[in-house]
Image: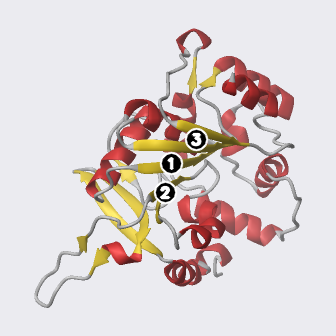
């Protein structure tokens, strides 16, 4: 039986090309590959007799859109890409263990994700950028801004925090009625996916169980590695630090955010 979510990928590819981006695979180093959606105009097809596709530097200000935990990059940002590509060079990465991005390295920390995302951006010729991070991607974006202030000029962060401390993790999970981050963010059943969507979305949209099942099969791959990412996400309260960011940071929050309440945003701003 055809997976309805997988069957839409060719359509998504066509629509995103019309919007101005297409997929491009970057070998960061042996054993580590990261998939990016990059501006179509930066990809130069090989000349006759050549086999290597050349990538050119962006010509417009760069915006990097970093996805959350429940979907890969272009699925998360598909509705924003077209609105941005006229004025900006838009790059949409798949973080490691999402989409086509993989590594044989054992590290699973947000710092590791940030370091390898930056390596990929450098290989694409990006020298300055504005980073937009959603949820898990926001934590990776904060690490990028902290470690690479020469690269990250400014940030927009939505539904995310500086770091997932054990106290925030316990409070959020208890309030939402989940025993672990994996139970919430790595559902293995239609019921579990519906529970995630019920707390992660504001408008409650109805989809048939078949579509939920197909989404689980396509979007929740690399389950072992993603569970390890969630384990590495939580740090002790005593290890939490507040960096001094030189960048302008814009916090964009949903009034009804059930995972990270507005109070956390106000505390973070202070």
| Quadrant in the rendering for residue 151 | top left
Q: Which residue is mark 3?
A: 138
67 vs 55, nearest the viewer:
55
Horizontal and vertical percent for residue 28?
Answer: 27, 52
| Marks 1 and 2 close (CB-CB < 8 Å) | yes
Which residue appears at 61% of the width and 48% of the height? Answer: 69
Q: Nearer the viewer, mark 2 or mark 3?
A: 2
Q: Which residue is mark 2?
A: 63
Determine whether 167 is above or below 211 in the image.
above
Mark 3 vs 1, N-terminal side: 1
The quadrant the N terminus occupies is bottom right
Real-space Cα distance between discs 3 and 1? 9 Å
Which residue appears at 36% of the width and 39% of the height? Answer: 115
Horizontal and vertical percent for residue 215?
Answer: 67, 65
Mark 2 vs 3, N-terminal side: 2
Position of 37 with respect to 46 (left or right) is: right
- From where the camera sits, is residue 130 visible? yes
Label 2 residue SS? strand
Q: Residue furthest left?
A: 49
Which residue appears at 68% of the width and 27% of the height? Answer: 269
Q: Residues within 10 Å of mark 2 (few under 14, many from 20)?
A: many
Real-space Cα distance between discs 2 and 3? 14 Å
174 vs 214, nearest the viewer:
174
Q: Which mark is residue 131?
A: 1
């Amino acid at each position: 039986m055809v997976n309805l979510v997988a069957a839409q990928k060719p359509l998504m590819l066509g629509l995103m090309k019309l919007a101005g981006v297409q997929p491009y695979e970057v070998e960061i180093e042996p054993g580590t590959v990261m998939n990016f959606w990059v501006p179509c105009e930066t990809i130069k097809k090989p000349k006759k007799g050549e086999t290597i596709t050349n990538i050119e530097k962006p010509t417009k200000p760069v915006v990097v859109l970093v996805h959350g935990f429940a979907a890969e990059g272009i699925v998360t940002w598909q509705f924003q890409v077209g609105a941005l590509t006229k004025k900006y060079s838009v790059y949409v990465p798949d973080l490691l263990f999402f989409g086509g991005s993989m590594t044989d390295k054992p590290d699973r920390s947000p710092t590791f994700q940030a370091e390898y995302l930056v390596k990929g951006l450098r290989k694409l010729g990006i020298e300055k950028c504005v980073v937009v991070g959603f949820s898990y991607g926001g934590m990776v974006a904060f690490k990028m801004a902290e470690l690479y202030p020469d690269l990250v000029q400014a940030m927009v962060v939505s539904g995310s925090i500086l770091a997932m401390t054990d106290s925030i993790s316990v409070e959020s999970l208890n309030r939402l009625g989940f025993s672990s981050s994996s139970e919430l963010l790595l559902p293995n059943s239609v019921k579990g996916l519906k529970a995630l969507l019920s707390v992660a979305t504001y408008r409650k949209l109805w989809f048939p169980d078949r579509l939920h099942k197909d989404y689980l099969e396509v979007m929740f791959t690399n389950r072992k590695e993603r569970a390890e990412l969630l384990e590495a996400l939580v740090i002790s309260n005593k290890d939490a630090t507040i960096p001094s960011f030189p960048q302008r940071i814009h916090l964009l929050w949903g009034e009804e955010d059930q995972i990270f309440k507005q109070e956390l945003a106000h505390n973070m701003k202070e």
